[in-house]
Amino acid sequence: MTPTITDDITSQQLCDWLAPIVDSEIFASREKLIALLAKHSPHEALEQEFREFFNGYYALALELEAYETSVLTLIEASDAFAHLKHCVSIVEAKRKSSPLGREVRRMGMSIHRDAVPSIKVTALSPDEFRALMRTLGDWRLFALRERLVALMEMERSVEIVPRLRAEFYEFFVSYLELELFLENYDYDPDEGLALRPEFIEELEREDEYIKSGGKMFTLEEVAEELGVKLNV
């Protein structure tokens, strides 16, 4: 659960909350991607690491997406973050997907109400794919993460909290910009991977259940049954 960072939160509490965010798998994978690019590694090696990178991005999104409304409200409330407000307004104006659409897209699926991404990653030429990896590897998010980590390693004090907040807001907006960029790319990290036998058996059981008259439930029906509100 996120701390209420406008309250009298301690630097330790804020650092404890930020720790799993800055330690997300995407950051280790990005370093590997950079190293592979520097060594002019084969296309297959880049493809394999990009799968890990994308899965890391998905994990980071799971950490952050629940806090988007509250973080953007805090940014909007302060004149000190006018530059971030401008960046957020650009993201919101250019977005083509709903919150639910962005969630299912990370899993290689889509919903009919959202626009279909225009670029299929697996159709890129090796040079185009390598250029995409360079763009992602150079994204400002990664430099901001290093700045956050450096602040978190400083002596814990009340004075450090406003700096941590401000740096995290910069980090969060850069994450939104990365998500907007990836919105144009159609990519399923599980495409081409072998399915486990037990998963295939489960799919076959579900298929037989539907064919024999079993009922399928929509996402909305499941949410209503569980008492969960969908943000669409």
Image: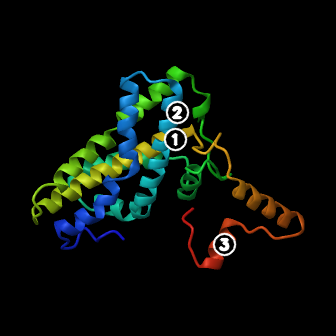
Q: Name which residue lies at 76% across and 59% down.
A: 201
On the image, the x and y values in percent for residue 149 come to: 22, 51
147 on left or right of 155: right
On the image, the x and y values in percent for residue 139 come to: 35, 37
On the image, the x and y values in percent for residue 102 come to: 54, 52
Mark 1–mark 3 distance (CA, rounded to whole Å): 30 Å
Q: Earlier in the sequence, mark 1 or mark 3?
A: 1
35 on left or right of 51: left
Q: CB of mark 1 within 8 Å of CB of mark 3?
A: no
190 on left or right of 182: right
Three-letter amino acid code of the residue under disc 3:
Val
The residue that label 2 is drawn on is 47
Q: Which mark is residue 33?
A: none
Q: Which mark is residue 222?
A: 3
Q: Residues within 10 Å of mark 1 (few under 14, many from 20)?
A: some
Toward the front, the furthest residue is 197
Three-letter amino acid code of the residue under disc 1:
Arg
Q: Secondary structure at mark 3?
A: helix
Above/below status of 34 relative to 225:
above
Q: Secondary structure at mark 1?
A: helix
Task: Determine if residue 22 is in view.
Answer: yes
The residue that label 1 is drawn on is 51
**Of circles 3 and 2, which is in front?**
2
Q: Quadrant of residue 224?
A: bottom right
**Of circles 1 and 3, which is in front?**
1
Q: Name which residue lies at 64% across and 43% down.
A: 193
Q: Earlier in the sequence, mark 3 or mark 2?
A: 2
